[in-house]
Image (spheres, rainbow, N blue to C red):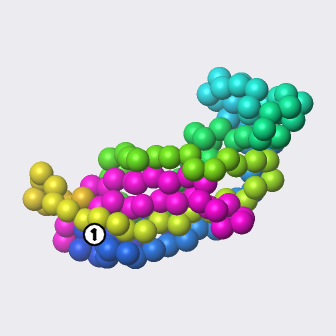
Amino acid sequence: MYFKSTFFEDYKIDDKRVTLGRTITETDFVVHAGHTGDFFPHHMDEEWCKTQPFGQRIAHGTMVFSIGIGLTASEINPEAFSRGYDKMRFVKPVHIGDTIHSEITISEKGEAKNPEMGTVTEHVEIINQRGEVVLVCDHLLLVKKK
């Protein structure tokens, strides 16, 4: 992890970066359930899941989001502030043993209320080892101008 100042003018539409991958483990399921209190059988009961059409435990969507976004945090930009996330969708299930990575594309830029700032939207796709998109969202940033 390192600091890199990137100002509003430095962001270019369609610029893309790709993260390293991370394999999802059973420990991830257990720790996330403990943190959130979400012990639904879809995530925790291997035997019950075998009786369901999906056949195996499904990762918590919020866990996939947290890990996928965490993968994007290799670079700290002191000129930008996260305003949140929009349009999040769980597209496909993630299972124990799947490896995910994130692909981030600058999709929009705009003016902010404060003339010293601009807005940037990063479109985030979290992708499994088969190249399938499993989660999408837009990360909204407020970024200082030069």
| Whole-percent x, y for residue 78 in the image | 35, 60
Q: Main secondary structure of the magenta part?
A: strand
| Whole-percent x, y for residue 92 in the image | 63, 50
Quadrant housing residue 126? bottom right
Q: Residue at x 39, y 61 (%)?
A: 122
Quadrant housing residue 110? bottom left
Decide if residue 110 is on the left or right side of residue 16.
left
| Whole-percent x, y for residue 48 in the image | 85, 28
How crowded pointer 1 is (Cα within 10 Å; few <14, some 14-19, many 20+) is rated as: some
Q: Which residue is drawn at 64% across and 62% down?
A: 132
| Whole-percent x, y for residue 85 in the image | 40, 47
The amino acid type found where label 1 is placed reads Phe
Decide if residue 16 is on the left or right side of residue 8.
right
| Quadrant assignment for the C terminus | bottom left
Q: Which residue is drawn at 68% across and 61% down?
A: 128
Secondary structure beneath dot 1 equals loop
Would you say residue 129 sits in the magenta stretch? yes
Decide if residue 59 is on the left or right side of residue 127.
right
Q: Residue at x 74, y 33 (%)?
A: 43
Q: What stretch is highlighted in magenta?
A: 120-146
Quadrant housing residue 60? top right
Is there any visible trace of residue 57 in the rendered image?
Answer: no
The number of numbered badges drawn on the structure is: 1
Instruction: Return the residue at label 1.
Output: 7
Would you say residue 89 sits in the magenta stretch? no
Nearest to the observer: residue 79 or residue 34: 34
| Quadrant assignment for the N terminus | bottom right
